[in-house]
Image (tube, helix red, strand yellow):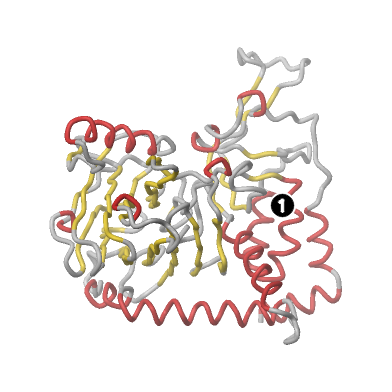
Amino acid sequence: MFVIYSSMEFRLICSYNIMCRTPQSLVAGLMWIGVKNGRYFMRHVCQDSDELKQYGWTSHNGRDYGHQVLIEQTMTLTTSFLKSKDRGSGYGGDWAVRIGALSDESVPDEEMLNNAHLFFYVADESEKSLTLGSGVLDIQGDSILASGSRTDIGDWQLHIFSEDVSGLHYSGFKTPHIHNLSDLVQANLAVQARKFGHLLLSDSSDDSPNILVFQISARIPFKADIIFLSGISTRDSRVEERASRLTGTSLTSLLSEKQKEFDNKFKKCFSLSDELGLEPVTAGKAALGNMLGGIGYFFGQSKISLPSSSTLNTGDNSVLYWPTELYTAVPSRPFFPRGFLWDEGFHQLLIWRWDIYISLDIIGHWLDLMNIDGWIPRELILGAEALSKVPEEFVLQHPTNGNPPTLFLVLRELVLVDGLLVVTEQLA
């Protein structure tokens, strides 16, 4: 989860709608091979059955910074992201993500346990073709992994910088959906394992791929910085300068500054006493970080049931709601990675205290879903990826079903006198 605004929010590292809120965006994410009981298996989506010892955000400001820790059976992964709107960047700006891996010192010194296999990918949901960069051949220094062009962000490049990774392998895929990407990667690795006896991507690609997956293999411990630069074709794009600022010691400093800003704002927002111990503060930051880190951007159409008295002839007694975009938090990344009206009222009781602009934005998106009868669907299942996580019998939304209007809880707080004073102060 490096950047906010995601098309879906149930991946462990999270795939992100990385530039801006658009229905068919450029998306990036991470998967990896884990080891348990001497066997390899793929990690990608967020599910409790994987039995990770820990996963989630330890801090996240909801906008341009976050840090998460994922404790595997044999190693610990950390990811930190940073967004930057620098001079010369395109719409949505640039971003950087730092990925680190540490081994569990209690694990026996076995070869398979001391090597990490990470798979970083970039995908264009609009199916525009991506261009493979030079970084797959020579990773020394700062190398280009991929590039492309879009009307919303202009020309872009994806770079990798690492002194610990000696080489890369890749595969390119052409597919209209990305929610089955895990299956595509595993199938590619399985073929390679049968042919050559190793778990390395095939270094091949479909014609005009809209997904490029890069396998980063290295001995643990290691770290790698991956950066995205937008708007690079403009006269004042300053590519080398922007890339340098988002890697190495410069990125270390920027991430440290953002963490300090998060810590200070957390203390101020919730009026924490200096006497409060470290443990409850750490838990509170994680609770807030996972709430903000679970905010996503969704687009699609809900399936609405028709009353028995309806004269519409649709064939299956249902109709599609209008095309909808929704910016919202989610109740649970493993089980309910989508918008729920009932839950969102409670989410905003926390979020507005942290960032009122985010809260008002989310509330506005939900109110935009209200139909002529004043009804809002209680559950928003928008897009193919969201549908893939919902049993068919729960997809249909019924206008006869409603939730208690919990959004009034936060609206009430925002219009109270004390609330208005806080709002005025934050908006000033």
Q: In which quarter of the image is residue 357?
A: bottom right
Near-viewer residue (63 or 333): 333
Q: Quadrant of residue 278?
A: bottom right
Q: Is 321 displayed left or right of 416 in the figure?
A: left
Residue 204 can be seen, yes or no = yes
Rendered residue at 37%/50% (across/down):
26
Q: Is 169 displayed left or right of 391 in the figure?
A: left
Near-viewer residue (104 or 236): 104
Near-viewer residue (410 or 132): 132
Q: Is 349 displayed left or right of 196 in the figure?
A: right
Q: Where is residue 231 in the image (x, y as percent from the top left)?
A: 29, 64
Q: Tell me: residue 318, above or below residue 276.
A: above
Q: Residue furthest right?
A: 417
Q: Position of residue 323 (x, y in %)?
A: 56, 38
Q: Tell me: residue 405, above or below residue 57.
A: above
Rendered residue at 19%/50% (across/down):
132
Mark 1 lies on residue: 344
Q: Is 83 displayed left or right of 46 in the figure?
A: left
Indicate the secondary structure of the residue bearing disc 1.
Answer: helix
